Image: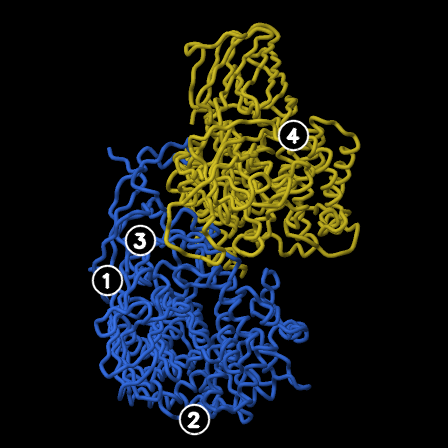
Chain colours: A yellow, B blue
């Protein structure tokens, strides 16, 4: 790793999003999800499973009598809510909301113990049991989420109350865990605290915070295995004793630098990798960065759905093995794709490599927002690439796959994770270093930043991902020598970049690792126009992906498309797509938000001659009929009706197989 | 139903099997499995999970101290062993084995309670709990298996001790269950007792035995649901409360005449349907027969694998929904296919319809014997149609699928079921009525039976399923007018039948419902020669079977073939079979037992140009290389090495897609 490549995000507080595509989502989160979730945390949603989250804090604070209720990680619902709400304050100040946050922070802090400990599950059920079941009870995971909330609110509102409380909790954790004799040589069962500690360190610059994050990373998977010893000594249940991954469920079966495959619970994995990248960057540890590279490559090149989904099995919400990417029994949790964005962003900060940005974009426009209905009221935990509603009902192996988004979840991890992702999106668009600004995502936005020491306003305008054009107006206080580095999306075969209307030629821009560097003098009002050709592309999988052999998916720009029963009838598996098909695109009339639909000609099997009562018969030359196909963006599926859906469609070499009467 | 169509099996004691294909299996069972299982029952197999079955009986009889060990249905291991051993005595008398059976029967009967009750689980763990958890604890299932053993040994050796004991147990059951006030209005949680009671009734002609079988059938699924009430009143665990099938797991959610789909646990289902067919036949109940027809049609036309496997889901070892026949996550338990043969035989006794015999043949030559290694020492519980060993290890959804047969099972249901199926095979070949003999299976055999009152010797010779020819020599004591009805296999498109060398023409034989009836005078030595053309057939599935769309399987005669990695390399999913391929067949050199292998030309995807690190790329015209393919009979898979296997292979319309250069 080359620390000269390091960049820092342009802080979200400095970036205003003005984007057709994302503004809608941000407003949905701000106006619907955040208020709805607040009601949910307070058990005020009729007909919904109670959350009890706020009550747990009240009971822990001694303000109310009662028992703990919910998952051991119920506290994180409050944490994620505070974090999302804090992010929203950055771009939409709201005194009432801020007061609500202050109030809930007062409540949370009032539950804190004298020694800094703060986890309602153990405060209510018995503090003597704390730190005895780190493997299962999410104590350090709760701490991590609350610390993320604390840093977010500190950045958003400049208020330290929760931050200071969490610093005390971190001190408490630091007294319990570490290399010193007498401390537990342990680490979180569910990762996140690692990256939260780096967020804290970047505020406090307290080496103790960095050291604890580093310890958690470096101790993980060291022999003897802490989690295994904890299970043995404390007579705990080890849930994965019959699994193939064993302690790798927790990414804790091997030291992190010896892990070369993305394994175990997918959300845990990408949260760990994010923390590893953070520690690698902050400490300049190249071996750790190389470990991140290895894991990234395995995950992205062999274990990632075309939608940016990861974790192909419902068993343990986990990775399985290379090229195992079933479309129908899939897991691809919304949270896992969000974690993948966290990891990608951190890798980008270390080295501006286009693939990191490509994956971030892929996940954002596909497998993340598919987790949310277009009206922001219903959510997917699991993001399948093929659905047959009857199978979800009658085949237990697919019962985790829902053909319709659900209102809310008892284990409410995905919706609030979506909320904090979307409210903080402005922090993912740009990174910078002294004399260069990197554009990673093409999201309409405005920012002011220092370029080579000169305050410079940046104004990006685009109708991405539907439109092929992006303009970036650069307005430094005065002419400055600097570099603009723009990601050339991996899906893009052909593009042009103009500066002030003049097409740049190779000497005027330098491609490197998926970015084009445009170095030179920038004067107020200079405008860069990027044009990315967005033909519809028919994409196939590596043939080692068994599930997709003989099939293709359809993309335009970063957007993956799918077929739905609503447009194309039942039995989508009987459809074939000639790989030479021509596509047209037009706004989808019945989908809000300006999504473009695609239209093409396809083939559908002529099932005449097959009777319902014939199960097997001698093979004949199949006959196909021409059929108009309508494709909608994958993320918009299941917004109109409950029916079949398919991303991967069988191909035909040509239209020759059409039966014409 | 027309009782004039009824036929009765030619008793197995009257039929001597002289068959290349099956004699091998029979000898394996007699010389290896029966002795091995006896050792297993007595816990004398080193390194194997103890069975404890005999010890349970010793403890129940007061001969030994100790606790009950094993499944609640552990008694059935002894029952199935006695039954298989009894069947073997019929065709291979063995005084030592007979003495062993007598001894174990003495032991079993010595455990019987004064009131006739005989189930070691409750005798040992507390008789006060008996009949309180019929849904889960297999009490009536154990009774059914032991009753089957008793009737088998009675027929084999003429000894009544176990039979009489079981009659006393049936009396005990009859005092507990029935329509009368004060009795439980219940029925077995796991069916089998129904058909066992009919076997008993056919010996005793005691109407009470028929009435109890009928009651169990007719009461099943009546409102209020007995099993549901039992769960509620006795505070039992209902294991399937989260399932889609609910009490249909036990085929007990609806009265049997209202059930129109094969649902729930597949073994239970076909055991019930067998009992239903028995009761329908014996009582002449047409509504019950029609219910059997409906269930048969649903199962065979919409829910049966091409191998005769049934029950497509590991969850509940159950049926799922129409046309859901996944090859890789499949269950297709060996026992379920055996139960399918039981059902088919009983349907044949009611009406000689070729499809019943076809399914019996399909299951026997494919999905049943696939459950057993060619050397008779290892067994499959689950019979997949596609296997990737890595998936079985690393994907929990396929962890029930084993790429290699296992030595023995803790739940040892399949191996002893195989043993009793194979040792009793001679009873499935023929059925008869007064003036007609039906030939259902083409298995080399000799029998003497009465045809139109005249003692007639029948001698069938064939090398089926490898050879296309079958001869049947008919030797009545004197010339007699009678009918021979021979099943024309459903897979057979073209055949000829000759009598004494003279090809029969349409007027001389009458086809009906899949049988050809040859009526006329038969004189000693008359010989019928049947020639069934056995071209290799490429077969496709109904297009509603999603899993098999665009794929085909290969059959020759009744035998389903597959590709194995051993012959064809890895990545079988990259292979395509042009549907016009020519096949040759020759004995498989490395597979014992005379199995024929097939050879054809196929295509294999040229994966050049795909790098391991590229997961998705724009679709190109695929290139295929010619490849010689070797196909082996499905039932012989996993006998040489552990590797990939596939029955369903992607098709190509022709060889045109071959890349030549």
Q: Position of residue A31 (x, y in %)?
A: 73, 34
Q: CA distance from mark 2 to mark 1?
A: 44 Å
Question: Crowdedness of circle 1 by 10 Å Cα count: few (<14), some, many (20+)?
Answer: some
Q: Residue at x 74, y 36 (%)?
A: A101
Q: Nearer the viewer, residue A192 or B429?
A: B429
The residue singled out by tag 3 in the image is B563
Question: Crowdedness of circle 4 by 10 Å Cα count: few (<14), some, many (20+)?
Answer: some
Is residue A215 rendered to the left or right of residue A595? Answer: left
**Could you tell me which chain the residue with mark 2 belongs to?**
B
**Could you tell me which chain the residue with mark 1 belongs to?**
B
**Element type where label 1 sits in the image:** loop
Disc 2 + disc 1, Cβ < 8 Å: no
Q: CA distance from mark 4 to mark 3?
A: 50 Å
The residue singled out by tag 2 in the image is B161
- The label number, if any, that marks residue B591 in the structure image: 1
Q: Is residue A634 above or below residue A185?
A: above
The residue singled out by tag 4 in the image is A593
Q: Is residue B560 above or below residue A314?
A: below
Q: Position of residue B342 (x, y in %)?
A: 43, 74
Q: CA distance from mark 2 to mark 4?
A: 80 Å
**Element type where label 2 sits in the image:** helix
Q: Position of residue B65 (x, y in %)?
A: 47, 86
- The label number, if any, that marks residue B313 in the structure image: none
């Amino acid at each position: 790793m080359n620390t000269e490549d390091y960049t820092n995000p342009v802080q979200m507080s400095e970036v205003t999003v003005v984007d057709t595509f994302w503004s809608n989502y941000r407003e949905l989160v701000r106006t619907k999800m955040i208020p709805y979730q607040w009601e949910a945390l307070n058990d005020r949603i009729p007909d919904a499973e109670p959350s009890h989250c706020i009550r747990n804090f009240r009971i822990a604070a001694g303000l109310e009598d009662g028992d703990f209720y919910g998952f051991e990680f119920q506290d994180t619902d409050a944490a994620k809510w505070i974090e999302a709400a804090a992010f929203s304050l950055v771009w939409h100040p709201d005194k009432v909301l801020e007061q609500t946050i202050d109030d809930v922070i007062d409540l949370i802090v009032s539950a804190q113990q004298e020694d800094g400990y703060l986890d309602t599950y153990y405060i209510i059920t018995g503090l003597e049991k704390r730190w005895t079941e780190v493997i299962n009870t999410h104590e350090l995971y709760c701490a991590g989420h609350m610390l993320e909330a604390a840093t977010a609110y500190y950045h958003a509102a400049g208020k330290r109350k929760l931050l200071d409380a969490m610093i005390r909790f971190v001190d408490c954790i630091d007294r319990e865990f570490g290399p010193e004799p007498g401390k537990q040589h342990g680490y979180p069962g569910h990762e996140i605290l690692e990256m939260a500690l780096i967020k804290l360190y970047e505020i406090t610059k307290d080496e103790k915070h960095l050291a604890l994050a580093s310890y958690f990373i470096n101790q993980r998977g060291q022999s003897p295995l802490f989690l295994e010893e904890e299970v043995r000594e404390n007579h705990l249940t080890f849930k994965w004793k019959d699994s193939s991954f064993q302690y790798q469920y927790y990414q804790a079966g091997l030291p992190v630098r010896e892990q070369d495959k993305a394994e175990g619970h997918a959300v845990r994995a990408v949260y760990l990798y994010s923390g590893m990248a953070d520690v690698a960057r902050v400490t300049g540890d190249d071996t750790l960065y190389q470990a991140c590279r290895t894991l990234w490559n395995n995950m992205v090149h062999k274990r990632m759905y075309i939608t940016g989904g990861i974790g192909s099995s419902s068993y343990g919400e986990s990775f399985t093995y290379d090229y195992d990417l079933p479309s129908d029994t899939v897991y691809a949790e919304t949270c896992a794709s969000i974690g993948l964005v966290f990891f990608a962003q951190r890798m980008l900060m270390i080295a501006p490599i286009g693939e990191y940005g490509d994956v971030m974009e892929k996940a954002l426009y596909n497998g993340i927002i598919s987790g949310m209905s277009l009206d922001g009221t219903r959510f997917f935990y699991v993001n399948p690439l093929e659905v047959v509603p009857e199978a979800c009902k009658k085949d237990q192996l697919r019962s985790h796959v829902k053909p319709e988004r659900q209102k809310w979840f008892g284990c409410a991890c995905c919706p609030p994770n979506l909320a904090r992702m979307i409210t903080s999106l402005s922090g993912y668009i740009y990174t910078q270093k002294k004399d260069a600004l990197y554009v990673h995502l093409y999201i309409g936005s405005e920012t002011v930043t220092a370029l080579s020491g000169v305050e410079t306003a940046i104004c990006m305008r685009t109708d991405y991902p539907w439109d092929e054009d992006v303009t970036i107006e650069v307005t430094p206080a005065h002419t400055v020598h600097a570099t603009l580095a723009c990601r050339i999306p991996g899906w893009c075969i052909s593009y042009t970049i103009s500066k002030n209307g003049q097409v740049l030629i190779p000497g005027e821009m330098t491609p490197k690792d998926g970015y084009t560097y445009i170095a030179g003098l920038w004067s107020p009002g200079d405008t860069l126009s990027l044009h990315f050709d967005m033909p519809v592309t028919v994409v196939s999988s590596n043939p080692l992906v068994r599930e997709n052999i003989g099939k293709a998916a359809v993309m335009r720009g970063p957007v993956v498309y799918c077929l739905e029963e609503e447009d194309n009838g039942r039995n989508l598996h009987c459809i074939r797509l000639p790989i030479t098909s021509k596509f047209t695109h037009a706004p989808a009339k019945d989908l809000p938000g300006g999504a473009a639909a695609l239209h093409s000609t396809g083939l559908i099997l002529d099932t005449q001659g097959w009777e319902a009562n014939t199960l097997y018969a001698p093979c004949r030359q199949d006959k196909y009929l021409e059929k108009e196909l309508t494709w909608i963006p994958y993320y918009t599926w299941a917004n109109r009706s409950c029916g079949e859906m398919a991303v991967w469609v069988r191909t035909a070499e040509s239209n020759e197989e059409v039966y014409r009467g």
